Image: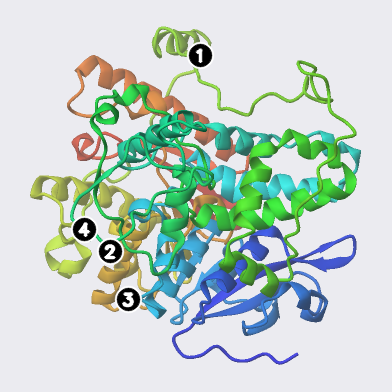
Amino acid sequence: MTHPEPSPGAARLFLEVSTVHGAPSLPLHSAISLFLLSYTECTSVHVHLVWTRAGSARALSGALPRSLPVSELKREDAPPLVRSCRLPAVLEADGRFCRAGLAVVLRCIIQRSCLERHGRRDVASLLGFKGTCLKACAEVSQWTRLCEMDIPSAVEEHLLSPTEEGLQVPAAILHLEHCLAEPVRVHNDDKLRRNKLRQQRNARSVQPGAPGEGGQQVCPTEPQGEDPRAEPRLAQPSEGVELSAALAKLSVDAVPAAATRECSDIRRVKTAELPDLEHVFAEGLYFTLTDVVLLPCVYRYLSSLAQHAPHTLDRLPLLLRWYARVRELPAIVRAAHDCGMSLSSPQRSRTFSPAPGTPWPGDAQQESPRPSEEHFVGGPRPTLTKLQENGIDAVFSPHPCPSWSLHWETLPSAVSPTEGKMSASRAVRKQQQLNNLVAMVMELARPGHTIVDFCSGGGHLGIVLAHTLPKCQVILVENKEESLARARERSSQLSLPNVSFIQANLDYFTGPFHVGEHMILCRFADQTAVQLPAERRSIGKRCMGLVDLDRGWAAEAHGYSVRVMTMEPESCSPKNNMLVGILAEKDTAGH
């Protein structure tokens, strides 16, 4: 097999190849990435299949898009930054910026495709309203977690034993079915809902022999600014408002519909009384990146059910309706053919169906996977009291160098947090925070060490460390596109050769390191802001100390010696705790 070299400036996409029952297979994350490349016709990405064991892409030729250049390599031969991440991952041509994780990689492919072809509105629209589709990380967005992680994992687990256990529909699939049943809320949906109400009234009013016979509109719209000679474009009753809006958005050459004005009786209806909009695609009315992510997953799952447990298909009517719509889209048909997917309609069985009100087998064990709400009674005080009664309380170590400070006036301007476009008072507090963190790192780091700045944001800490410790390698890990873009710009101004960037959730970073900077606090530990009452801040500080105590115990269980201390001055940040952990056995440290 020929392995063409990537063209200059091309990004490199690294996809995992796994082995299932002794045969090479593309995990769903890899298959989804390839499907999107084919759908968008992106040509500025070179694909590398990464094998954990020896293998050949010839065995996967039917699943690889014919139009894409593909190379193969072993995991240990991948670039260092890629080896530090879970796949899929995209490495930019300079080798210093890596994106990892399915949602991040897919959004990168779409953005590169839009740069290649500015007229592809259909590709740009995959990112949804305001470009936020699957942008929120899985750690904070249940929807991103469902699409990026839960459903692919559930389908792959099902495919390992796709027997009559298919009756046990995975919780993630049931969750998706429930989501498809929920009313759709889209930006400025009032007009669509009134249009739907008009169609519903017209359908009831048009009877044989009645004034509305022949399909005339009983409540016509009043066009504004239209050519009076043009035929009005009205959605056919069989299409429905939702499907008409969805198909119009999908058209590459679509133009905005002319403004219309509903008749008075429709305009007088209160918003709360308007009919809900129904799903056409996964996120509502419009086809987005989410549909591209879900299609390979649902395709494999439904194909397995049709073969092993066809009666289970009757439990997923909304998912089947979604699948039927998606698989008819021309661009989907083309991409599916390119990737060796036969999007035939799964045959539903009518030989097994429980009587109304009778639970399906396994329903007793399967409940709706909706997230549970935690209920707190009495705030944190009862918990704090119980812990204190059992001898558990936060313990703080003295700060080893409370007055140490960087010489900010001698550093290049791009190193200073004032370059991050913040107020002067906040910049001073940020400098104080950095003094504490840099002091601890300089105590631990040695030449040749790798330092990782987790949740790096705009790179305030990582850039200071890279400039101050030129013999150490610094990696900034951040999942927000905009924050990492600012960090890269500042690094470029300083021409720092020892800093790299990874856009990914923390789960996707797996590389080794000697010193790591990481600050995560939760729930009541967040209530330490200066504008809060003093008593509440004090409780928040105790909670934060207990959270850090628990984190310290967890680190000690892995062989670390841990100290918890307060930054100096305390006013530098409401989140002013530091954890310093030293792993003496391997002469490494984690902070």
Crowding at dot 4, Cα within 10 Å, few <14 / some 14-19 / many 20+, comes out as: some
Q: Position of residue 91 (x, y in %)?
A: 50, 74
Crowding at dot 1, Cα within 10 Å, few <14 / some 14-19 / many 20+, comes out as: few
Secondary structure of the residue carrying tag 1 is loop
- What number is the disc on residue 391? 1
As measured in the structure, the alpha-carbon distance from the residue carrying label 2 to the one carrying label 4 is 22 Å
- What number is the disc on residue 81? none
As measured in the structure, the alpha-carbon distance from the residue carrying label 1 to the one carrying label 4 is 39 Å
Quadrant of the rendering where the N terminus is positioned: bottom right
Location of mark 3 (residue): 496
As measured in the structure, the alpha-carbon distance from the residue carrying label 1 to the one carrying label 3 is 49 Å
Q: Earlier in the sequence, mark 1 or mark 4?
A: 1
Please, is residue 421 above or below residue 284 in the view?
below
* Left or right for 564, reference 144: left
As measured in the structure, the alpha-carbon distance from the residue carrying label 3 to the one carrying label 4 is 18 Å
Location of mark 4 (residue): 406
**Residue at 75% over, 64% down:** 342
Location of mark 2 (residue): 486
* Left or right for 316, reference 294: right
Please state which of the two labelled residues, at mark 2 or mark 4, is closer to the viewer.
Answer: 2
Please, is residue 193 above or below residue 506 in the view?
above
- Judge by depth and name the residue closer to the eye, 56 or 34: 34
- Hey, what amino acid is under mark 2? Arg
Q: Earlier in the sequence, mark 3 or mark 4?
A: 4
- Hey, what amino acid is under mark 1? Gly
The reply to whether callout 1 and callout 3 are in contact (CB within 8 Å) is no
- Hey, what amino acid is under mark 4? Leu
